[in-house]
Image (tube, rainbow, N blue to C red):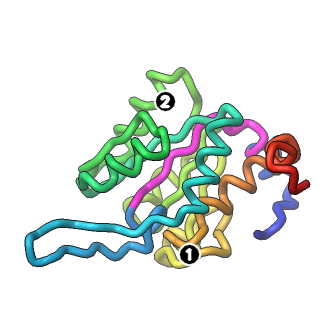
Amino acid sequence: MKEVTDERLLSRIRGIKLLILDVDGVMTDGRIIIDDAGLESKQFDVKDGHGLKMLMKSGIDVVLLTGRKSRVVDHRAVDLGIAEVHQGIWNKREVFDEILKRRKLSPEETAYVGDDVVDIPLLKRVGFGVAVVDACPEATGVADYVTEHSGGRGAVREVCEVILKVQGRWEELAARYEFA
């Protein structure tokens, strides 16, 4: 994990209260598996999931906001305890604005992780915009932070750890596992 040293960015990360994630290409490696019966499956990284649970345990909520619709995403959200999921969203900015209005949050209090051109408006608008390392060049070009790990391969866990460490919550969480 890269260390964040820019004081302006550190200040913005300290104020994060909500993490919004794209799914395909962020929580997964972007591949969609469809079998002969038409059943869809995706692979998720268990460490990403644990990172999200630690983040939520520390008081930062998580929302999924994705352009595709898949029952697999609903199952993963339930498994992780993520209550708010928006699927089949073409205009992510419109839904993003609704989420913030309902939660009485500003864009600066929000982090967003994406991987493609459809994510660029949110990457530019939030307090902490993150692109996964294997995102399209246009997304990595506007992101505040580009992960070292690929989508579906630890990128989400990396983002969770960056937020928790910058906010000074990592040590407390680590003490629960007695590894610090």
Give, as a single range, the part of the protein colored magenta.
Answer: 13-23
Q: Which residue lies furthest to the right in this view?
A: 180
Tell me the kind of residue under disc 1: Ser
From the image, tell me which residue sits under label 2.
100
Query: Residue 168's x, y, as percent?
Result: 86, 42
What's the residue at 78%, 40% (across, down)? 14
What's the residue at 35%, 39% (across, down)? 94
Tag of residue 150: 1
Q: As displayed, is residue 25 above or below residue 98?
A: below
Q: How many labels does the image show?
A: 2
**Residue 98 in the figure: left or right of residue 37:** right
State the image quarter where residue 172 is shown: top right
What's the residue at 47%, 59% (across, down)? 120
What's the residue at 46%, 24% (across, down)? 101
Mark 2: few, some, or many residues within 10 Å (few <14, many ≥20)? some
Q: Which element is circle 2 on? A: helix
Query: Residue 129's x, y, as percent?
Result: 60, 55
Task: Compute the Cα span from label 2 to label 1.
Answer: 28 Å
Which quarter shows the C terminus? bottom right
In the rendered structure, which disc, 2 or 1, sits on the residue that comes first in sequence?
2
- In front of the other: label 2 or label 1? 1
User: Residue 88 or 176: which is nearer the viewer?
Assistant: 176
116 within the magenta span: no
Tag of residue 116: none
Residues at badges 2 and 1 in contact (C-beta under 8 Å)?
no
Tell me the kind of residue under disc 2: Leu
**Residue 134 in the figure: left or right of residue 144:** left
Which quarter shows the N terminus? bottom right
Query: Residue 178's x, y, as percent?
Result: 87, 50
